[in-house]
Image (cartoon, helix red, strand yellow):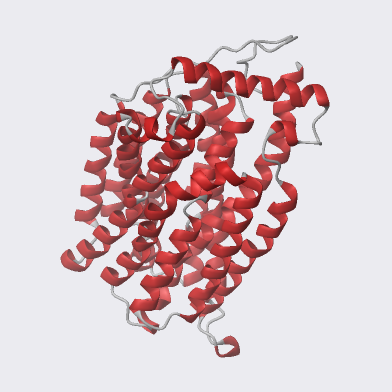
Amino acid sequence: MSVERRAVAKATKRLIPFLFGIYIVAYLDRVNVSFAQLQLEDDLGYTDTIFGLGAGIFSLGYVIFGIPSNILLQKFGARRWMAVIMVAWGLLSASMFFIDSKESFYLLRFLLGAAEAGFFPGIVLYLTWWFPEADRGRTLALFMTAISASYVIGGPLSGGLLELDGIAGLDGWQWLFLVEGIPAVVLGFVTLRFLDDRPRDAEWLEADEREALAARVEGELQAKEAEGPVGSGIRSALRSGQVWLCALIYFIILSAAFGLTFFVPDLVKERTGLSDFGVGAFAVVPYAIATFAMVKLAAMADRGGNRRLYVIGLMAVGAAGTVMTGYAQHELVITLALTLSTVGLLAVIPIFWSLPTAFLTGGAAAAGIGAIAAIGNLGGFGGPAFTGAMEDSTGGFETPFLVLAGLLVVGCLLTLLVREPKLTSVPEPGAVEPATEPAT
């Protein structure tokens, strides 16, 4: 194994499990409100419209603060800025314990989105500092399996916490927000000591490994600055049609994903009659399969090279699953429908992100990734708000899910317009193996 390959393997083993863990906490704090809905409707009188707006307003804070937060991360470094973000969102998530009106619900969801705005795009940017382009899709997928894992772990956990209803005079949803918010605060302080900003800062790498990995990543960045469709400055990113095209596609993906995800517990309970814990456990099978699919398909896309086709194919699978979910009534059919939609809408995300990170560098990477994440997350507002309002209006999920599926078909067509640069070839000094060979 070459020096560079050793360095990539060590970085994967050290960084990805930790980032995976903190993203589980982040994503769980973001979507645990979908499980809390099972009691909020009765305890606080929230309609699906109120819930959909509250669930989605998170994304407004995310949009407003996404780009500035990512630029600050590049300025101050991932280690310090990620620690700040995690402590802030953990405290805000736990503060959901105090909501007593729709206004306080909206306010805290907005502030939670503002606090978390720089986390996901910051990690995407951070991984471009550490991993060569040929490894990008696989490492993004390993990190993003935390999305599906958060449901595998968080579904039963959230359902179990809801069963604490009445203990110590607290509602189950209060236990849910309090218990699931604290880990982010603790992990924020751990992040401050654990992360290294760049390969050259990593004392856990040998000197030759630090040099080889840094040279590889920096060489790719320089090559992309010279040949890529977008320059390296912030203005270049914000003026790029490719950046805004990617933002629109990501908006579509997240509109469908969150428009479906936030209402799955309600749909499952309504159609199956399961208990709160049973509804949480119901999510295990679809999300476990999606976890495997994310890693496997991202590795295949890295090797195959045509990532656009994978994005298109997975969005089509997500569209089919979304339509099926709208009409499914039997438990087995619901499970199949949710598995298709979950695989399509989750496995597409890391492969999608390998497209813009292949042509964005420097300040353009910070601004471009932040812009794509921010605009895309408007879908995290629009999808749930639309689904909730339509469900209240029509009395069912069939119509909103058909619309979300149609939106995904539009996304498939738009993806054909994304330019996919060829993998950058940067020779590694003294390499024994081809530098673009996937890590083992």
Instruction: Name the residue rendered at 65%, 20% in the picture.
Output: 216
Residue 328 in view, yes or no: no
Please tell me in which quadrant of the rendered image residue 242 appears.
top left
Pinpoint residue 134: horizontal percent, then vertical percent: 56, 21
Question: For the C terminus, which image quadrant?
Answer: top right
Closer to the camera in the image, 43 or 267: 43
Pinpoint residue 19: horizontal percent, then vertical percent: 63, 46
Instruction: Name the residue rendered at 44%, 43% in the picture.
Output: 370
Pinpoint residue 423: horizontal percent, then vertical percent: 50, 16
Specify the farthest residue to the left: 394
Residue 256 in view, yes or no: yes
Residue 15 to residue 170: above or below = above
Closer to the camera in the image, 305 or 295: 305
Pinpoint residue 40: horizontal percent, then vertical percent: 40, 77
Residue 98 to residue 369: above or below = below
Asked whether, in this view, residue 71 is left or right of residue 431, the answer is left
Asked whether, in this view, residue 375 is left or right of residue 73, the answer is left
Closer to the camera in the image, 386 or 85: 85
Asked whether, in this view, residue 363 is left or right of residue 128, the answer is left
Residue 137 to residue 267: above or below = above
Please tell me in which quadrant of the rendered image residue 200 appears.
top right
Question: For the N terminus, which image quadrant?
Answer: top right
Residue 435 to residue 159: above or below = above
Closer to the camera in the image, 413 or 328: 413
